[in-house]
Amino acid sequence: MERAADVLKLNLYWLSETPDDTIFDFGFSKSGTETLEKWGRERALKRFVEIIRTERPDIICPTFLDIPGQHGHHRAMTGLAHEVMSAAADPTFPDVDLPVWQVKKLYLPAWSGAGDNYDDDLPPPNATLTVKASGEDPVTGWSWAQIGEQSRAFHLTQGMGAGCLMASRTTGRCIWCGPRWTGPTTN
């Protein structure tokens, strides 16, 4: 992910800053509250405020919803996204010496984030905005959906990207971007 961000000239932020930071991936959690207890709510919010005030985005769009069934780390970040809207614009927010910034909009996904396998305990909200992402990447000839599936191949431990076949119109080659086939299994 870091290399992809570098190629695209994007700034990639982790809330943790050092290996011994209190904000770390401690394993699977179903609770945003548990995650923020381990991370330190104030530390996580402060770091998020620093990022918002540095990058000055107009829109924040978390990838997941803060509802039962979602991973606790995702729920924590979505919850903090709501808080950071006012915190980054508050000149009295403590210990951040950067100019205030008001994010103008927060969009939440109207889907689960689990692809076709809806695993959330609550249904997603109704969509209020739809962004059409039809078409193809002009360089690879892949659809945006195919590119999304390819990215999921890097999340195999979370049950995503079990396999996807993509064919480039420019080369005619097929690319398998799932787990490597190691031959037939024997019992």
Image: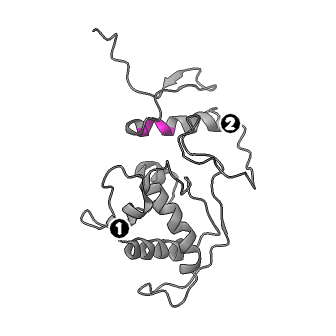
Q: Of all residues shown, which one is farthest toward the left? A: 20
Where is mark 1, residue-wise?
37
Q: Is residue 30 left or right of residue 38?
A: right
Label 1: which secondary element: helix
Pick the residue in front: 121 or 173: 121
Q: Quadrant of residue 40?
A: bottom left
Kind of residue sitting beneath label 1? Glu
Kind of residue sitting beneath label 2? Glu
Magenta stretch, residue numbers: 151-155
Query: Residue 59: x, y in percent?
Result: 64, 66
Please, what is the dominant secondary structure of the magenta stretch?
helix
Q: Is residue 158 visible to us here?
A: yes
Query: Residue 182: x, y in percent?
Result: 33, 17
Q: Is residue 173 left or right of residue 59?
A: left
Query: Residue 137: x, y in percent?
Result: 65, 38
Q: Residue at x 75, y 55 (%)?
A: 128
Query: Residue 121: x, y in percent?
Result: 54, 46
Q: Mark 1 Cα within 10 Å, few/some/many (few <14, many 20+)?
A: few
Label 2: which secondary element: loop
Q: In this view, does 27 lie to the left or right of 134?
A: left
Where is mark 2, residue-wise?
136
Q: Quadrant of residue 101?
A: bottom right
Q: Of callouts 2 and 1, which one flags the residue occurring earlier in the amino acid sequence?
A: 1
Tell me, yes or no, whether the two marked residues, 2 and 1, touch with CB atoms within 8 Å.
Answer: no
Position above or below: 5 against 104:
above
Q: Distance of mark 2 from mark 1, alpha carbons?
A: 43 Å
Q: Is residue 88 visible to us here?
A: no
